Amino acid sequence: MHELELIEKAQKGDKNAYGELMSLHHRTVEKFAFQIGVKADDVQDVTQEVFIKLYRFLHQFQRDRFTTWLYKITLNSARDYYRKEQREKDKEEKIQEDVNFGLTTRSAESKILVFEEDRELHEAIQLLDEKYRIPLALFYFQELTYEQIGDVMNIPLATVKTRLLRAKEQLKSALSQEGDAEYGR
């Protein structure tokens, strides 16, 4: 069944069509969430939030490009998730120190990023400011056009181009510094 047919049926309350829509886009949401900085341990939670929001607001979808709309929901869900998590963490810090946090994140990431180069690239991308990290992930990993990126992020086309250029420069610099350090230069 075609994506638009699934959307129309899901908008009319067809739960099977919504399930197919979820299956069709589940991996895309997971990958994008991870690429924009969602920790490996949190990807499933954020993905679940995305599909809950999608279900609640599917009636508002107006025949734009569905994946662009889905990227917006994913981006906002990731931001909301970490705002909420930060509030909870602040509360917990007042009660006790969470010693295992760093260890669990590291082990989950090592399962996802198999090759050392992938791990190094991912870590370098994660060090970029969000305004550079997100367009980079959308362009190179999700293969969106400049116009689509601008739509997802609500920024002008010129800003998209500038941020991508700066992101590449910063990434190149970070990776060359890492390489220099590795080889003792």
Image (cartoon, rainbow, N blue to C red):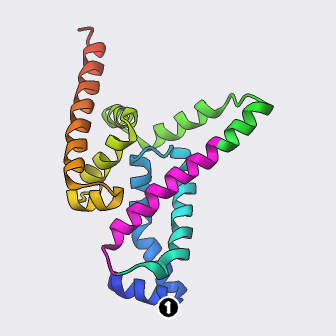
Q: Is residue 145 visible in this depiction of the protein?
A: no
Instruction: Name the image quarter holding residue 122.
Output: top left
Name the residue beneath numbered marker 1: 12
Would you say 5 lies left or right of 46 here? left
Q: Is residue 124 visible in this depiction of the protein?
A: yes
Find numbered disc 1 in the image and state the secondary structure of the residue it sits on: loop
Residue 49 locus on image (x, y percent): 56, 62
Q: Is residue 74 magenta?
A: yes
Residue at image location 48% in from the left, 85% down from the top: 10
Up the image or down, 167 lies above or below 71; here it is above
Residue at image location 73% in from the left, 28% down from the top: 97
Front-most of residues 139 and 86: 86
Q: Which residues are magenta?
A: 63-86
Predominant secondary structure, magenta span: helix
Residue at image location 21% in from the left, 43% down from the top: 162
Residue at image location 54% in from the left, 56% down from the top: 46
Residue 172 locus on image (x, y percent): 22, 30
The crowd level at tag 1 (other Cα within 10 Å; few <14, some 14-19, many 20+) is few
Quarter in which the N terminus is drawn = bottom left
Quarter in which the C terminus is drawn = top left
